[in-house]
Amino acid sequence: MTGTDTTTGASDSVGSAAAARAVAAAGVDAYPRIVATLIRLTGDWALAEDCAQESLAVALERWPGDGVPVNPGGWLMTVARNRALDVLRRATVERRKLHDLALLAPTDARPEHDVEDDRLRLVFTCCHPALALDARVALTLRTVCGVPTADIARLLLVSESTMTRRLTRARTRIAQAGIPYRVPTGPALAERLPGVLAVLYLLFTRGYVPDGEPAFADEAVRLARLLDGLMPEQSEVAALRALLLFQHSRRDARRDAAGNLLTLARQDRARWDRAAIAEGQAALARVRDDGPYAWQARIAACHATATSVDATDWSTIARAYDALADLRPSPVIALNRAVAHGYAYGPAAGLGLLDEARAEGGLSGYPLAGAVEADLVARLGERSRAVTLFRAAAAAVDSAAERSALLERATELSR
């Protein structure tokens, strides 16, 4: 291993546990910076990821005795850069790559915007539309977030070998298709940005659903913060950040002590993450456009700031869903619009919109449509019919948590 930079300075020696925490904290920010920079210089994704991982491993070995450097990120970048130099020298690759790496200045000496540009390049390349959606998700988790391949495989319910092959194919596709390692500009940015945001939204959704893996949601929130920090002028990026924060603020209140799923009406709002809500409000305040994420963030803000379901500004939510249905119509938006109108203007109004949505055919086979109908019918006072509908919806859902919650509603109405 080429000598590690010691000019950044270090504190006194620390214990292994404290060093591990320091490495983990530094790695959150440093890993994507290192990977992005080394990919730009070498074009070798595997080398960049391996060197970034090795820098973390070396830190775990050295920091307990040497102390945590004053600039942990700079220390990690130096170790990764030196490791890349060693590998390239042994492989006797073309001189141009070696020359570029040799000229790479330490992280703390480089203009910050250069590093930020590298990270943006990395995000847009991982989310390129030439890649299949699952490949974009996996590559983003591995390369931008630094999630180990084995963990990604577990999260996506495939074997580690399958995930390794999927990641390899994605990297190969990037090389063979000549996908440029750059952030698009002008009209191309407007065309590509929604695809990047869609990957983040999908990541979050996979973690937020009742039987989902929370790590997905955590990583999506972190990526939304990163992207918003790098592209503060993009209104829809700020809107997505706000939306995810509002939704994520309820993560600790969505289940009771026994693990049962709780509806909004039953959640203890004192357990909602007020810091996340405040951060979401600050992000939403910067939103000036009326894009799809902006409308969804405004809806989520109404829920996040209400003191109860009854105190929720349902008329504002209903109008937002009206706008969203015009902007980006979909069966799910139509269903949620029916719910909002049912609370804003009465259950009969909601049932009318639900009938319209079903007539269009998009909700066929969607079990939660039955759950919405059951709730609206119950609010009309037709308890017996609502019980039947709740039980039918419970039989149709795949999620055990949702099934249990729906059957509980049926039991309550039967009493």
Image: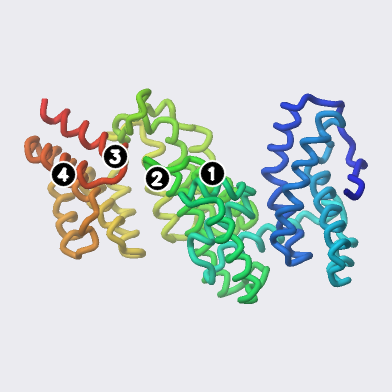
Mark 2 lies on residue: 300
Mark 4 surroundings within 10 Å by alpha-carbon count, few (fewer than 14), some (14 through 19), many (20 or more): some
Mark 4 lies on residue: 392
Q: Secondary structure at mark 3?
A: helix
Query: Gap in Å between the C-alphas at discs 2 and 1?
Result: 14 Å
The earlier-in-sequence mark between 3 and 4 is: 4
Mark 3 surroundings within 10 Å by alpha-carbon count, few (fewer than 14), some (14 through 19), many (20 or more): many
Mark 1 lies on residue: 282
Looking at the rendered image, the disc whose residue lies closer to the viewer, 3 or 1, is 3
Looking at the rendered image, the disc whose residue lies closer to the viewer, 3 or 2, is 3
Q: Is residue 230 visible?
A: yes
Mark 3 lies on residue: 402
Looking at the rendered image, the disc whose residue lies closer to the viewer, 4 or 2, is 4
Residue pictured at 40% horizontal, 52% vertical: 296
Amino acid bearing label 4:
Ala
* Left or right position of 261 against 338: right
Residue pictured at 48% horizontal, 38% vertical: 277
Q: Position of residue 58 (x, y in %)?
A: 80, 41
Residue 394: which quarter of the image? Answer: top left
